[in-house]
Image (cartoon, helix red, strand yellow):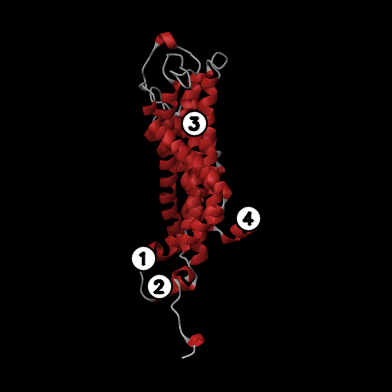
Amino acid sequence: MDVSERRWPIARSERQPGYWRVIWRRFKQHRVAYVGFFFFVFLLFLVVAGPHLVPYQLDQVSLGERMHGPSPGHWFGTDELGRDTWVRIMYGGRVSLAVGLTVGLSTVILGGILGILAGYVGGVLDNVLMRIVDTIYTIPRIVLLLVLSKVAGPGLLNIIIILVALEWTNAARLARGAVLSYREQEFVLAAQCLGASRWRVMLRHLLPNSLAPLIVAATLDAGAAIRAETTLSFLGLGIQPPTPSWGNLLTNASTNIFIAPLQVFLPGLFIFFALMSFNLLGDALRDALDPRLAQVRR
């Protein structure tokens, strides 16, 4: 038999890569992704391991070392009670990042479920949910934050609940839009003809195809939650002392801004890096999940 007529097996490298493998490949080609990912991992490492790098406790007071500048003993100096600023910023980062990650994940889960239900079921449910979303969007977000935080009171759990109650609308609209574009396509109609239940169609077919915009929304909502938490804590309506967060650290330091300006600059710098990392990751994920944007970037 002629060699040209032989049928050779397809090499593994020639097989079509899976969907998530293609997404990962596009993500790695995005230069901005490396910057955002580096800052995110670096911040996580600092807030987890940072307090253990120095021999000070969170509320260890030393009145003889008040308002000292950076030194080998205190890398970021000390505050008005002589407490180590490095330790307090690292612990504050744990709280602020925990709020951002919790709110980002919760809003995507809640908003994604409600958006998929509204888009697939339609009818009264769709109208009611979308009118709620439109109502929340019409009221200025800062007004809602201030009013709800004042009514519910300060505290970590209350801040998370308020932010989830306000931020789920973005994920709901994205999920609903994705479902509306998919529910009349052949694979959904075929599943319905084969007797698949509504829940199976939504969870098995519509949810996986709606993950792309929801993943991007999670990163953006996490950054928005950190920004909202720091704003409320700075105004005294968020995380309350003695629990540190980047927002209330700014509040405490603002009274001594002319004596120790680094006490204000350093928490603000960490807030900037956190918001930048989430925004850059969101931008890179959006480009990786959208092949049209990925081609434009090239």
Q: Residue at x 49, y 31 (%)?
A: 230
Spot the residue most to the top.
64
Q: Position of residue 174 (x, y in %)?
A: 51, 54
Image height check: is 102 above or below 121? above
Which disc number belongs to residue 200? 1
Q: Nearer the viewer, mark 2 or mark 3?
A: 3
Task: For mark 4, give the secondary structure.
Answer: helix
Spot the residue most to the bottom.
1
Q: Position of residue 192 (x, y in %)?
A: 40, 73
CB of mark 2 within 8 Å of CB of mark 3? Answer: no
Task: For mark 2, give the secondary structure.
Answer: helix
Q: What's the residue type where badge 2 is placed?
A: Ala
Q: Position of residue 196 (x, y in %)?
A: 36, 71
Q: Nearer the viewer, mark 2 or mark 4?
A: 4
Label 2 belongs to which residue?
Answer: 191
Of mark 4 and mark 1, the one earlier in the sequence is 1
Query: In the rendered image, which quarter is residue 120 located in?
Result: bottom left
